[in-house]
């Protein structure tokens, strides 16, 4: 079974990949706003991990899981 921290690290990686896709120059900037929101959520998730704040981690995980292609 995956721990909260493991799940959060997995989702951070997944969303970072999405950010790269959304920032693709072929999209002519259409994904840049979404990418900015994703970057903000990743930053919050990384902060939660660094603080070890379980409540913040759970919320951050939920936010990251909401991002889809």
Image: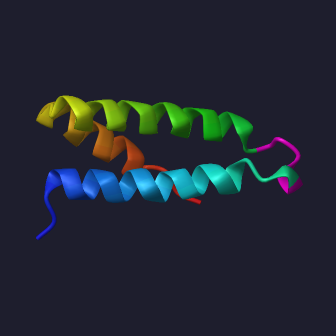
Position of residue 60 measured from the top left corner of the image (x, y, whole percent)? 31, 38
Is 28 magenta? The answer is yes
| x then y, percent, for residue 6 | 22, 58
Name the residue at 88% across, 46% down: 28
Front in this rendered view, residue 52 or 27: 52
Q: Is residue 31 above or below residue 24?
A: above
- Is-magenta flag for residue 17? no
Q: Is residue 26 left or right of residue 13?
A: right
Q: On the image, which quarter does residue 31 sit in?
A: top right
Q: Decide whether the magenta segment is chiefly helix, strand or loop.
A: loop
Residue 33: give x, y in percent of width and height: 68, 34
- Quadrant location of the C terminus in the rendered image: bottom right
Image mark count? 0
Q: Which residue sits at x=44%, y=56%?
A: 13
Q: Residue at left 25%, top 57%?
A: 7
**What span is colored magenta in the figure?**
26-30
Left or right of 53, for residue 47: right
Instruction: Identify whether 67 is placed above or below 63.
Output: below
Q: Residue at x 63, y 41 (%)?
A: 35
């Amino acid at each position: 079974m995956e721990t909260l921290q493991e799940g959060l690290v997995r989702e951070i990686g997944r969303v970072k990949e999405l950010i790269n896709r959304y920032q693709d120059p072929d999209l002519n900037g259409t994904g840049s706003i979404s990418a900015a929101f994703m970057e903000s959520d990743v930053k919050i998730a990384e902060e939660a991990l660094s603080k070890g704040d379980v409540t913040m981690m759970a919320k951050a995980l939920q936010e990251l899981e909401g991002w889809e292609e």
